Image (cartoon, rainbow, N blue to C red):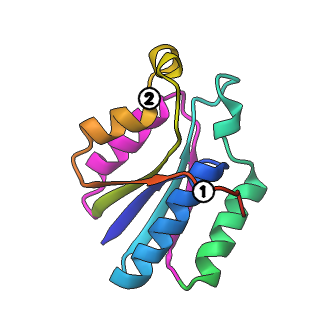
Amino acid sequence: MTILVGYTPSTKGQAALTAAVELAKKTGDKLYVVNAGVGEAVDERAVATEDQLNRAREYMKAEGVAGKVKQYLRGNDPAEELLALTEARSDVTMLVIGLRRRSPVGKLFMGSVSQKIILNAKVPVLSVREAEEYEL
């Protein structure tokens, strides 16, 4: 089976990837690591560079975990992209995402990708608190 990972080049993305790798090592599942973004300057911090995607691939390989790392910049909201992938792929049994603390005002104006995923996913969601340091 496959664990889908919502990845961003950040402490929360690293936390999600690390947790998913550890889980895959225990279960033998493959990982499908996805970096999704609108593809415009809306939030470029969430869009990984090719070097960052390669480091995620290298990390998985070094840990002995099989899987793929892909990027989708098709103009879709990242939450919608991940939710669509969980529905389109019958092999996805879990979705792993990273979380970070946001102020109530920040949630009001920006919404919450994580909240949208947790409330609408058709598969179990493992939400992981952001790491203190970004290691990749």
For the C terminus, the quadrant is bottom right
Q: Position of residue 131 (x, y in %)?
A: 60, 56
Tell me the SS state at disc 2: loop
In front: label 1 or label 2: 1
Structural crowding at the residue carrying mark 1, measured as other residues with C-alpha within 10 Å and reported as few (<14), some (14–19) or many (≥20): some
Q: Nearer the viewer, residue 33 or 112?
A: 112
Does residue 97 appear to the left or right of 131 in the view shown? left
Q: Which amino acid lies under the numbered mark 2 shown in the image of this protein?
A: Ser
Does residue 25 appear to the left or right of 134 in the view shown? left
Q: Position of residue 50 (x, y in %)?
A: 74, 54
Q: Nearer the viewer, residue 114 or 6?
A: 114
- The disc at residue 131 is 1
Q: Position of residue 98 (x, y in %)?
A: 49, 50
Residue visible at 70% across and 36% down in the picture: 45
Q: Which residue is mark 2?
A: 112
For the N terminus, the quadrant is bottom left
The residues colored magenta run 65-91
